[in-house]
Amino acid sequence: MDQSVAIQETLSEDENCIIASQCLLVVDNATESRLVGLVARYEAHAMFIFTHRRMAITGEDVTLDDIIPVSHNFAIVEVSSPDELAIIGADTRVRVTDSDRDLELRLPFGSHTRLFLSEVNRAWSEVCEKSPAEVPTSQFEWLTKYRRSSKGSSTDLMTTEPLQVPSTWTSQLKKSGKLSLADRKGHPASVENNEHRRGRSDESRDDLVRSSSYMVSNKAQMLAMPQFGLRDNLIRSELLKNEEQYIYIKNFRFFLGTYNVNGQPPKESLQPWLGFTSDPPDIYCVGFQELDLSKEAFFFNDTPKEQEWTKAVWEGLHQDSKYAFVKLIRLVGIMLLFYVKKEHAEHISEVEAESVGTGIMGRMGNKGAVAIRFRFHNSDICVVNSHLAAHVEEFERRNQDFRDICSRIMFRQKDPSLSLLTILKHDVVLWLGDLNYRICELEVDEVKNLIAKKDFETLQKFDQLHRQIQEEAVFSGFVEGEIAFQPTYKYNTGSDQWDSSEKCRVPAWCDRILWKGKLVQQLHYQSHMTLKTSDHKPVSSLMEIGIKVVNEEKYKKTFEEIVRNLDKMENECIPSVSLSGREFEFNDVKFMQEQTKTLTIYNDGQVPCQYEFIQKLDEPTYCKPWLMVSPHQGFLAQGESVDIQLELYVNRSTATDLNSGQQQIEDILVLHLDRGKDYFISITGNYLPSCFGTSLQTLCHLREPIQDMPLETLQQLILMTSEEVTEKPLDIPKEIWMMVDHLYRNASKQEDLFQQPGLRSEVGKIRDCLDTGTPDSLPGSNHSVAEALLLFLDALPEPVVCYSAYQQCLESCSNASQCKKVISSLPQCHKNVFNYLTAFLRELLKHSQYNQLDTTILATIFSAFLLRSPAKQEQAEKRKTWEFLTHFLIPDHS
């Protein structure tokens, strides 16, 4: 369903009209929903409100209700009721006014709503920057024909609730940039309007401001909105520099809990774990791992246990206080819940959640992390719940998982022009979870003897995490409190007895809680032995954290002083910067091997400046797809510098054109200064061709390693059709044979094959071996070779089952003979590879008692690579591709 298509069809009579943004509108009576769209025609914008059917697909499914021009009489402010403040994540209420309307709309919570509101605000700001005299009277004549079909004003969207509470998203535009800010007691905030704003527009806009107050953090958000220019960025910068003048530190208590529940449902009260403190905590962050171990949860991320454990947590919170639910995020079995005392809810803002899988191919969510970031008063906090790689010997893999989580989890900011936030760019980072670091170099009896003596200090010397932190290999800058409790893994489920199974696991502190940041004091750090649901014990930490709270009066004085100083500044000088370099060369670039160089920009001018890398003429983006510039825009005060990371990374989407020579490692970056000149930065380099990203047809004609081929010969061969090549091709690419043969000989009985990730360094060596032909045998672990095989299949420009046959596969998935017929119609090299790979998978299934593989696991993993969709794949299609491949894995098709 694409409702924007339906809206666009209603505008088809005017080809100049486009949908600038659209959002679902939820009506208060809960019996119907609506669509609200921001429609643009040249430089004019208007909000269109539609009623629609549940399955709005075409223009006939939507009916235009009302049109609100984004003119000088327009205003939009977010409002909320007191009850809604108790639940962070509730629908967003906005009040929209113009000369004829006063509407209150409820929009669904989420990033799409924020983006929609940002686009509306951007359009409004463009209008307000002009005087009425500059706007032609005919600007909105194009709306006349649509008003004829409109049912009229949507008065049923209005509510009678007064606007009483702090706004979390608001904007009042001022030509001068001067603001007189309200305090939290509800005193009105006055706005110094432009001289040209008169009449009802000014009155209604002032009424909106008088009807609500807002927190300082929201004022900072306002200054961060993209319509504000250099002046307001400088205000924001100066406010941050002078933060100590208007903030004070107040301590709040955070409860952090982590529990690996081993796929079990809640069987006992969580009160002994969550409610053990004498005083109720201000904030709860509760993490779970292995919430559900079923295949449905692993492959389709669907589990009823999410609701069961959420209910158990809610009932287990401290009984002496009332809490508001803020956020839940789950990745397969990794879940993080965030609650806050109701009286603190209004001070929570900018809540964002992200997840990243670190399982095989970096996609599978059986291992990985979920994270929530938020602003509490004026402090930015990030909470991470992770489940890292298992097994004693895999500590390097755990270290890599940690690094991947830190680099791949990125939070969007309210201002889309600002760079993404990483985990470590927060005032306080709280990290919990099943980190899976083990106790090594001691026999199980030695460990148990030390535990019996409660000699945890000696035992911790053999703890892998303790050692890795000391070696600065992982969790650099993080702190863990003293461990004065016995290891939390592994117990016989339902008891306090150590693991008595055949494997007899060595006890270990798998479940940990660490932190990074200032003004953090840990009050308690302990396990909870009374809970026996799982083979792990839950762990809790109670922390007292100093939070930056704003003194409104001091803030107001600081703000006004900055504005006065800016009024005195002369901004007539042209901005100027110096660069550390103008030419950057990347040598011997390889597939999926990142290279990074640093460009330093120094503001050597007399005034602050804003910089941005801009698009070149006739190019869609400011840089080539294999290059990333971070940050690509920003603000520099006088005398400040910034390091720009130029990251070159060739992946599956860019490798094919580089292999064929259709693209080169060449680009020109244009660095633009606001009100200043442009600087040109040259990017050059050479790419080493790789079998990754090369077609099966080409590889079948390569008898030598790809990097031994002359570049011109290789490029000609890639561009040739099969009819133009006279030499008889190989049945299958030798690279596939090398990887499959290695796994067949060495990994048929390997546990967790194709599920446990390999090491990135080993995968790189395997790639080099395939591309150069040396050494004769593949290096690295079986898991690394398995991941290299999946990476190879994923990078094919045309999948093993060609795109042209994909729809036939879906249609024939329930009929085994039809499935075989589809495969028989594939080009010869594609058919050979498919049959070769499925024969190998059937061989693996013969050893399922050792490798723990079954048809469901292999079909789910390999269907994603052998039968890729030419477009975005729907959930129903995934099940059909799984069913298609299953027919080739059962013995009857051997």
Image (tube, helix red, strand yellow):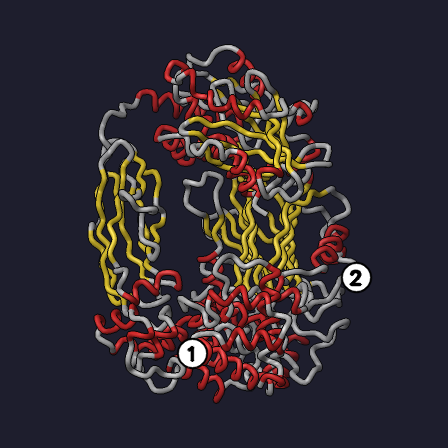
- Residue located 34% across and 82% down the image: 729
Q: Secondary structure at mark 2?
A: loop
The residue at the point 45 percent across, 16 percent down is 193
Image position of 48 (left or right of 774): right
Q: Position of residue 752 (x, y in %)?
A: 57, 77
Which of the pair 444/36 is nearer the observer? 36
Coordinates of residue 411 in the picture (x, y in percent): 49, 48
Label 2, residues with CA under 10 Å away: few <14, some 14-19, many ≥20: few
The residue furthest top is: 199
Relative to residue 77, is residue 733 depicted above or below? below
Answer yes or no: is residue 246 visible.
no
572 or 746: nearer the viewer: 746
Q: Give, as a three-letter code, the residue at label 2.
A: Glu
Residue type pointed to by label 1: Gln
Task: Classify the position of the C terminus by image quarter.
Answer: bottom right
Check disc 2 and report the residue beneath it. 268
| Distance CA(mark 1)–CA(mark 2) | 59 Å
The residue sitting at 60% across, 66% down in the picture is: 880
- Residue 498, by quadrant, is bottom right
The residue lying furthest to the right in this view is 268
Side (left or right) of 537 relative to 1: right
Instruction: Measuring from the top left, give residue 617's x and y in whole percent.
Output: 27, 42
In front of the other: label 1 or label 2? 1
- According to the picture, the residue beneath numbered tag 1 turns out to be 828
> Badge 1, how many Cα within 10 Å: few under 14, some, many 20+?
some
Using the image, determine if residue 27 lies above or below residue 473: above
Would you say residue 4 is visible in this rendering?
yes
- Seen in the image, is 269 located left or right of residue 864? right
Q: Earlier in the sequence, mark 1 or mark 2?
A: 2
Circle 1 — which element? Answer: helix
Residue placed most toward the observer, 7 or 387 = 7
Extreme-bottom residue of the structure: 745
